[in-house]
Image (cartoon, rainbow, N blue to C red):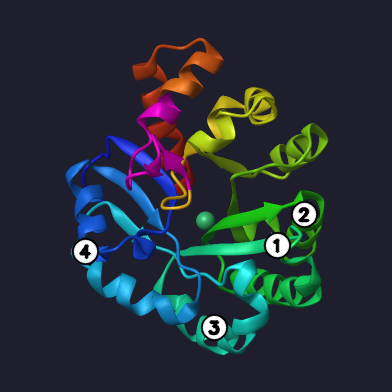
Amino acid sequence: MTRKPDQVDFHCHLDLYPDLATAIAICESSRTATLAVTTTPKAFRRNIQLARSSEFVRVALGLHPHLAEDRQGELLLFEALLPETRYVGEIGLDAGPRYYRSMPTQEMVFRKILSMCATSGGKILSVHSVRTAGRVLDHIDECLPRDRGKVVLHWFSGSAAEASRAVQAGCYFSVNQAMLEKPRGREIVAQLPLDRILTETDGPFVDIDGGPVTPGGVLPTIKSLAALSELATADMANQLIRNWIKLVS
Ligand code: MN
């Protein structure tokens, strides 16, 4: 990336918007350093192709925990594609009511991906941890040595104790507006070190004003984070960009 971005959207499903090229163009024109996460290895190529000339969009290779059971057969493709990107996501675990039954497969897939990342080194991972923060951190401890990759916990919803454990483990946190609308989410975010926070939209899965959030639509989140830390919005915006630079450099 040659120019400094104006803002950061570190977890957005650009390919789940009606038109991927338009979603990429929105991130370019708003100068948003965007992590385009994907949910299956098969979706990766199209993202890479369309984002090839983009200055601000980076594509992550993913295998979403909701799809682990159906798509575990794509782990070989995952391994083959991994050298093509420095970014991995969306990966992780989900023990919500619809998915806890597939937990053994989810854990197998997650551990294999962590081990592949440990072998290659230098990857940055966007990780889902619904009702599994402790388990996710256990697997990371066991499979990804700290000097072999960096972890960003996306939409973290664990306990305060789990959050401090993640901070100790060196994790970053990408925070979206839906998190900050709940008192519990605000409490957790308020406890995080300012230099470990990034913004994300998790578009199109987060609604703002009755419709899906726009890619790069992080301004309300920057404002909420600024209010939470009693900082000026511009100062918070700069802090978030510094955090992103530190993470990716
Ligand atoms: Mn997501």
Please give the name of the residue rendered at 29% of the width and 43% of the height, measured from the top-left corner. 32
Amino acid under label 3?
Answer: Glu
Q: Which residue is mark 2?
A: 132
Instruction: Tell me how far mark 3 sits from mark 4, CA to CA.
Output: 26 Å
Q: Which residue is mark 1?
A: 93
Of pointers 4 and 1, the one earlier in the residue sequence: 4
Q: Is residue 143 above or below residue 71?
A: above
Of pointers 2 and 1, the one earlier in the residue sequence: 1
Q: Which residues are magenta?
A: 206-222
Instruction: Tell me how far mark 3 sits from mark 1, CA to CA.
Output: 19 Å
Q: Are marks 2 and 1 in contact (CB under 8 Å)?
A: yes
Please give the name of the residue rendered at 63% of the width and 73% of the height, measured from the top-left corner. 113
- Of tags 3 and 4, the one toward the viewer is 4
Identify the mark at residue 21; answer none if there is no mark: 4
Amino acid under label 1?
Answer: Leu
Of pointers 3 and 4, the one earlier in the residue sequence: 4
Q: Position of residue 37 (x, y in %)?
A: 45, 61
Q: Nearer the viewer, residue 120 or 244?
A: 244
